[in-house]
Image: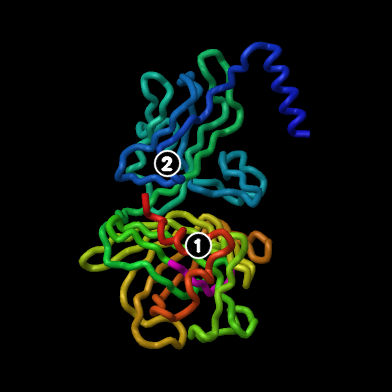
Amino acid sequence: MVYRLIAVMSMLAAGCGDYDPPPEVAGTNLARGTYDPARGDIVVRLSEPIDEASLQVQIVTSRYSEELDLCVPADALPKGCDSAATVVIDSDSDLIRLNDERTEIRIDGAGLELFTKYVVRIAGGLRDDAGRTRDPDSLIPFFARGNVQGTPTTFESGLFFGRLTTTVPLPIKVTLYFWIEVDSDEGLVKLFGCDADPTNGGPDSTEDSMKQEKWKADPLPPLGFTVLANGLIQEGAEETIMELLPFDLEVTTPPVVAGDAIFRGTIGPGTPPGDVGGTRQLVAGQLDAETVSLGGTLLDGVAQGDLVLFRLDEGEGPPLSALLGEGVTEEDVHSTFED
């Protein structure tokens, strides 16, 4: 039905000459949906010159209904929104500028709160000089990354094991393996996460021991890993910080899916969780997710919890290959940062 409608519209457009669409967003400088305030303005490129009087652009906090409608405007909220998204930069702000050609919007985002998710909203009604008008809003979600800058690091690639314990919206305990691949020269990391299951077949919540004989990797087809996250390491004199850009996390037991998760933690020696004992290298910090579902049911509110991982010694725990699915090799992982 949809394809037939598109075909009819195409024939109508052809019958009336070349179709000239209304103005639209042609591109941004928000690589992978991420904004680094240290690199200057947010830039939104338009497909053609616009009527400046029709431009209404805002930056609002990322707040959506269960139907994934942005919770704006405040005086006419979509169904399912209990409160409005906060307008952080409004359309009359001096922080928003349109270039002389009227094809590029620049927004000074230096004052945005770091490590926070936002949306650029260009309100419907945007029109070109001929009066052709784009009716729906144009929404550009992005993440204002923290002030962590990748630096050369002594942190090495390796296998980590640990636990995510959430308190909001429900107390949930999830156990995971992570292979962390590192570009030590640039301070870049990529995390390949895999669900871990107790070897006795029970749920995570019934197994308190963190000793390796109690656990096995449970890769999820087709890739095996259920977390794929990019991040940065900033190594300083007082502390070493790891920051991950927004990612999704999925585990099968319990059946949890967390969307648009962000993580910031520290790297250093410490006592691992559970009964392992001794001192290990830890990656520990807070994880926040925009959405979370349990058993396919979307839960109210965001997810918050503590993620604590500890490095496994060589030969301890499963081999990297046990975390991977068909068609993914260890070489694929190790070549992550190769040109």
Image height of 214 relative to 295, above or below: below
Within the magenta stretch, is there residue 173? yes
**Most prominent secondary structure in the magenta stretch?**
strand
Closer to the camera in the image, 292 or 83: 292
Q: Which residues are magenta?
A: 170-179
Tell me the residue that label 1 is attached to. 329
Residue drawn where x is 50% and y is 44% of the image: 141
| Residue 126 drawn at (x, y percent) | 53, 25
Q: Secondary structure at mark 2?
A: loop
Residue position for label 2: 30
Neighbourhood count class around disc 2 (C-alpha, 10 Å): few under 14, some 14–19, many 20 upward: some
Residue positioned 64% across, 82% down in the render: 202
| Residue in the picture at 36% in, 19% down | 100
Judged left or right of residue 142, residue 114 is left
Percent from the top left, x then y, of residue 297? Answer: 68, 61
Residue 187 image point, x, y percent: 31, 58
Q: Amino acid at mark 2?
A: Leu
